[in-house]
Amino acid sequence: MYILAIESSCDDTSAAVLRDGILLSNVTASQAVHEAYGGVVPELASRAHQQNIVPVVDQAIKRAGITKADLNAVAFTRGPGLMGSLLVGVSFAKGFARSLGIPMVDVNHLQGHVLAHFIRESEDDHDQPEFPYLCLLVSGGNSQIVKVNSYKDMEIIGQTIDDAAGEAIDKCSKVMGLGYPGGPIIDRLARQGNPDAYQFSKPNIPGYDYSFSGLKTSFLYNLRDWLKDDPDFIEHHKEDLAASLEKTIVDILMKKLRQAVKDTGINQVAVAGGVSANNGLRNAFKDHAKRYGWKIFIPKFSYTTDNAAMIGITGYFKYLDKDFASIDLPAYARV
Ligand code: KG4
């Protein structure tokens, strides 16, 4: 059974092909056009998707070693995301599936991130979580702790009440004039800095919820004071600033996660989403595995940021349940 998956929720155009749930190809075209603006420009994103979608799908099918006539279904990201971006992938998927006379499966982008741990590159790949497991989903738009009871049954037990972790990193990076997206830049600088050089505020909110807006403000105000004394403060201390910021964010994320593991008694713990590419966070997971006996699941770098492979595996599970999408199903920007 061959499934083609399409992801276009933000600024990556991606297509993947799976055979019986095993990944055969995963092709992604990223959009450099947004770098000059310090963030994703929705209108430019949808135009770039329009340019990229045909060659990306073509490449994914070719690299899988099949032709489009072999396909049995098309899975696509229905939302959440940028509406103009989603419309390109959703419309393409509908037209493609209709022209081939095969069913479509709609996928929730966040569910895709959480199920990225089930992407298998070969028959021998059996390192998948068992249900239930906890997943820390951290991206530019979300910071959540999800209790995953089955492929279909997921419960958000904690989430950010304001900014997402990735958003906080990107904004602090922008304040430092470091470019966009800030995550990979902060990650690289942090490796050369002292994580205990500076202290930034940590939120104190109940339950498993997160908050990152206070940290962002504290970072900004501290920086403003330091710049008064030394106009080149950022240039002189950017490694230490990045390392301290990263440590603060990782500490905030892991504290709530530890509490959730303790309270639920679930010790299989996964991380997903763009921020899961962060080395500090990955190391914290490894450290917790050693210290607390967690069984951890960290995705390959290529499955941390937006990709069609995760849409494909989620679509595959829905296909097995015959959970198909109708042709008039609209995209949605928000859950
Ligand atoms: O999941 P994702 O690709 O997109 C959505 O949010 O939809 O996540 C993007 C976020 C951005 O905020 C980016 O700065 C962050 O993930 N990110 C990182 C790293 N790579 C990407 N944050 C920290 N360290 C990284 N290495």
Image (cartoon, helix red, strand yellow):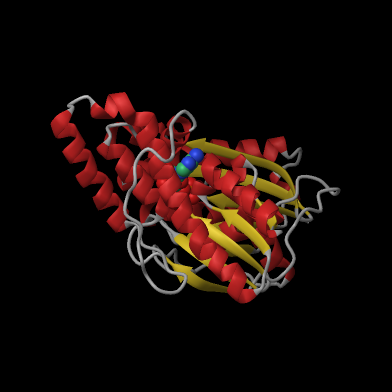
Nearer-the-camera pick, 46 or 217: 217
Nearer-the-camera pick, 298 or 69: 298
The quarter of the picture where the C terminus appears is: bottom left
Rendered position, 105 above or below 93 = below
Residue 231: image quadrant is top left
Nearer-the-camera pick, 43 or 166: 166
* Residue 99 appears in view: no
For the view shown, which residue lies furthest in the right direction?
A: 124
Q: Residue 310 in the image: x percent, y percent?
A: 62, 53
For the view shown, which residue lies furthest in the left direction?
A: 228
Q: What residue is shown at x 54% (from left), y 43% (from top)?
A: 277
Q: Residue 153 in the image: x percent, y percent?
A: 62, 75
Q: Is residue 179 left or right of residue 99?
A: left
Q: What residue is shown at x 86% (from left), y 48% (from top)?
A: 124
Q: Residue 267 in the image: x percent, y percent?
A: 68, 65
The quarter of the picture where the N terminus appears is: bottom right
* Residue 192 appears in view: yes
Q: In this view, does 31 lie to the left or right of 254?
A: left
Q: What residue is shown at x 17% (from left), y 39% (from top)?
A: 225
Q: What residue is shown at x 67% (from left), y 70% (from top)?
A: 266
Q: Residue 188 in the image: x percent, y percent?
A: 47, 31
Q: In this view, does 63 lie to the left or right of 302?
A: right
Residue 107: image quadrant is bottom right
**How many marks overall?**
0
For the view shown, which residue lies furthest in the front direction?
A: 196
